[in-house]
Image: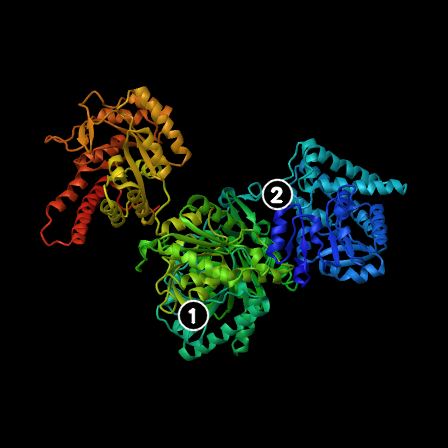
Amino acid sequence: GALLRAGISVAGYDLNASAVEALAAAGGRPCREAAEVVGPETSAVVVMVATHAQAEAVLWGGGADEREGVVARLRPGSLVVLCSTVPPDFARATGRRLEARGLLFLDAPVSGGTVKAAKGELTIMAGGAAEAWAAGGYLLEVLSERLYKAGAAGDGSSVKMVNQLCAGAHIAVAAEAMALGARAGLDTRLLYDIVSNAAGSSWMFRNRVPHMLDNDYTPRSALDIFVKDLGIVLDEARRLKFPLPVASTAHQQFLLGAAAGLGRLDDAAIVKIFESMARVTVASLPGDRGLPAEAVFAQLPPAWPRDELGPVQEALAAGARKLVVLDDDPTGTQTVHEVTVLTEWSVESLRAELTQPGSPGFFVLTNTRALCEADAVARTREVVANLYKASAEGGADFTLCLRGDSTLRGHYPAEAEAVDEAVRAQGDRGFDATLICPYFREGGRFTLGDVHYVQQGDKLVPAGETEFAKDATFGYRESHLRRWVEEKTGGRIQAAEVHSISLESIRQGGPAAVDLQLQLLPPGAVCVVNATSEEDLHVVVSGLLRAEGKGRRILCRTAASFVSARMGLGRLAPLGPRDLAVPLRRGRGGLVVVGSHVPKTSAQVAALLEARSHLLKVIELDVSRIVAGALSQRDIEHWAGEAAESMRTGRDVLVMSSRKLLTGADAGASLNIANAVSEHLVRLVEGICARVRPRFVLAKGGITSSDVATSSLRARSALIAGQAAPGVPLWILSQQSAFPTLPYLVFPGNVGEADALLRLVQAWTGLGTAMSTAELVASAAQNGYAVGAFNVYNLEGAKAVVAAAERMHSPAIIQLLPSSWRHGGSPLLAACKTLAKEATVPITVHLDHCTDEGICLEAIKLGFDSVLVDGSHLDYESNIAMTKRITQLAHAYGITVEAELGRLSGKEDGLDGPELPGCMTQPEEAARFVAETGVDMLAVCVGNLHGAYPPSGPSLDWDRLAALREAVPDAVPLVLHGASGLGEAVVKQCLAVGRVGKFNVNSEVRKAYLNTLKDIQPGDELTEVIVRAEDSMREVIEAKISLFGSLERGVP
């Protein structure tokens, strides 16, 4: 990569095919074998392999014929650069052999690994003649951050040999030391932190021990390499007659690791030898570290006895200044509701919001987290200057808050200082102090004892130990906020100079104590806030407003929770699609855009794909191709067209960057990569939105969500309606946008459990919920209602089922009998499945009463969601055998199976049952039947009938139904056929006694359809008749849905 970026033409070969593919994607020439790299214009060959034997094979060929190697193809005067770790004598001999052929040679072993190689940041120790340096020194300069001239050929390998002695010994000693600490009962992560900052540390200790702590032995550098390299060291020492007791011991440790089968793992796996011998574990995984949250919270002092939200609201109503929140990315709106966010900061827009009556404040999306520090400072100053102009024109006063990341990332202290300087530049008095408050309940971010924690599972993990602290642009080490200030200010503000408001002050002294502390802060002070609850924030804000009322000016840099408290806003329950007073496009797919690369986001994407990949159109942008400049506008246009076509059919589209995180040489370069990825995502989203209006848009990640809002959707402002899920803002775009009233879900990268993204997509999609028939029915049985399964014969019937279910917000099942399937064929099945897929509520398609094993198997393969294997006409053992065979195959396809035991009386659609009571379902037989067949649902006969009931009405055997429910496991719902004619009292008793999960309905729906046909009058338009027929069936189905209790059960 570094050579290509330098404009050098590169051909390459590697045993790893993916490496060759990456070269091709970056613009290099891929080769199928090593010798192919040499072309007519080749002036230099760089060899970087694992062993000297491999180097010999590449250069001279693997056999007796040297013409097979690359050397034979090189023109005289060409250069060979050997970057492998080899014995010094081999390097010298190679130089002599090449010189004899008129070729130049540089012995240039490297240190730094593949990551630094790609960045051009290797350390290279090279030896060779002056002519060789003149011919190829520039190549080494491109590849290296540090380049050393070690002498003649062989001297570079000698230097590398000494380096490997130190490196191998350091790894072995680090493993030994950490295992000793574990045996002594020490917290190994704490031990690592201490030693890393003490005299015992080394580069290898700091680099390899984290692999041990994370139990992550992905081979960045394989253990076998040090078996080889330390072997070279010992061989050379033997030739020089030099004793190496430490290197010998280290080599034996690596040999032990190789003998134990660890050779291909990361070299840090050597620690496993000590773990095995001492029976200890060095690893300290995220789930193992941190403080037990429940125990910590239980030990805290009791909360301040009065909730101060009311006094905050009273102070705001009495004339406290309007809060203007400068938000460094869109996710900061995640705790407020009925508040405006501006994505531009013209004086006119700011004046309109400042003078808006009744509003406690508003957001200005500065998106500075996506900018370099200099640009972030310039933008912040511009916004503040415009605010003062707008305030002067509108006569409205305001105060400022910097909303930043709850995991401490962002431009601190630069933005805070820029605000203070900009305020003073307007001739106004600057701020007396800065308040830092990163508490954020929805994200599990808590501050106590001045240490900021992230809750992971049931543990509170210091923020500096989480993946967020490893951010390539805004990374940090300190979790203790006072020391964090010192770290971020480069020591300009010492930890001892930082003040804090403790939980004890908040909970025992209340607003008065907070007010007093703020009054006593010296000029320019920085003060951190401890908080573990919303009530703590209400106390802090109440005290802050008191202090401001007495003339103090405090600049707050906070997470989202503080903002809602400062605006006097309570919390609302999450909002769903039906909670909005805006139309959602029926039959349109939604658009999900994922740019964030934090591990939490990648886990959420994986969960979404696992559950709904069959319902999503997925477009993945390869980040490595973006960085290499290999993605063209033609690619973007092609994908945009594909996505738009999918969305027009109601299919949701997921646009995502590839999940492998690429970072740059420094924080600025990493930010540039992130912005390049976002730029390509935005261009693709722009192309999609130019073709179709989405049902909704969900953007994951701060930079991504900002760029999509401002560039792709051209949103100048939006109303923050509330939250779509805890910590996930829901915007409604304004009229000044590409799609007025479009719901826009701003999903932070660092929020939510693993299934949070999946649940949001399920709730908002136009394709219903990806639930199997078994899940629908089991959920109904567990929650005291039943799902209606309605037999249909044509498209009109299927449309009636979906229309009724959507109007009633209910799940439902479309059922086809084998006879109607035979008549309608594949087109009828396809129509039913399409309607189910495009429904906004869970709908599945079920084959009813299939008595033929071959037809059952065909239905499974052709895509029914579930089948009723009806062996009720067979004897008991034969029923078990057939049902078991079909169930095993169906489950392999992910298909739900219903079976029937007992046989219903009555006639309907060719189903001709015997007389009762001989075929009633026997509880003891039902228990064995379910256990042996593994079916998901069981249809039983307890006096229910196919077709019409006698004038006396149904007569169900309630004792039998209760006994069946007792005999059959709860995980297997009971099903009742013949629900036409069952009244409300009977249905309620079925639900109560048998916890029935599914009722089958045929006769009443069919009758409604036929009655419509009977009423056809001469001159009636056929389409009008069809609509009347659909409406008649829909009304019957709606009544049944209400009867079965599934009303409003259609949203997960």
Q: Which mark is residue 321?
A: 1
Kind of residue indicated by mark 2: Asp
What is the secondary structure assignment of the residue under circle 2? loop
Q: Nearer the viewer, residue 258 or 997?
A: 258
Residue 533 on image: x %, y %: 46, 52
| Residue corresponding to mark 2 | 214
Q: CA distance from mark 2 to mark 1?
A: 49 Å
- The residue positioned 13% from the left and 46% from the top of the image is 1013
- The residue positioned 15% from the left and 43% from the top of the image is 1010
Q: Which mark is residue 154?
A: none
Residue 959 on image: x %, y %: 23, 24
Kind of residue indicated by mark 1: Arg
Whether residue 955 appears in this view of the structure is yes
Q: Quadrant of residue 818?
A: top left
Q: Which is in the foreground here, disc 2 or disc 1?
A: 2
Q: Is residue 489 left or right of residue 198?
A: left
Q: Earlier in the sequence, mark 2 or mark 1?
A: 2
Residue 462 on image: x %, y %: 57, 49
Residue 732 on image: x %, y %: 37, 62
What is the secondary structure assignment of the residue under circle 1? loop
Q: Is residue 605 left or right of residue 789?
A: right
